[in-house]
Image: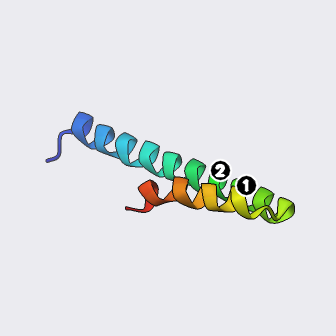
Amino acid sequence: MLDHKLWAQRIQVTYSLSQQIRKRRRDLAMKLSLNKRRKSKKKINGDLLWLKPLSQ
């Protein structure tokens, strides 16, 4: 039988991780849509540089 405390902890960790990822994705989507509205190439390039560490 599984240790309930351990199991609950694992679920908590996975849940909080997925929440963080979802939040980051939403922030990125907002950033990208702002960039599209502005259509400033310099800003988009800066954001792409900022995105690279995340994707690696």
Residue lying furthest right: 37
Q: Which residue bears the numbered disc 1?
A: 30
Task: Return the mark for residue 42.
Answer: none
Which residue corresponds to the image point at 50% horizontal and 46% vertical from the top-left? 20
- For the residue labelled by badge 2, is the local secondary structure a helix, a strand or a loop? helix
Classify mark 1: residues with Cα within 10 Å, few (<14), some (14-19) or many (20+): few
11 sits left or right of 4 in the view: right
Q: Nearer the viewer, residue 23 or 34?
A: 34
Which residue corresponds to the image point at 42% horizontal and 47% vertical from the top-left? 17
Q: Which residue bears the numbered disc 2?
A: 27
6 sits left or right of 18 in the view: left
Classify mark 2: residues with Cα within 10 Å, few (<14), some (14-19) or many (20+): few
Give percent across and percent down for residue 51. 52, 57
User: Which quadrant would residue 54 be assigned to in this image?
Assistant: bottom left
Which residue corresponds to the image point at 38% horizontal and 40% vertical from the top-left? 12
Give percent across and percent down for residue 32. 71, 61
Distance Cα–Cα, label 2 vs label 1: 5 Å
- For the residue labelled by badge 1, is the local secondary structure a helix, a strand or a loop? helix
Residue lying furthest left: 1
Which residue corresponds to the image point at 37% horizontal and 61% vertical from the top-left? 56
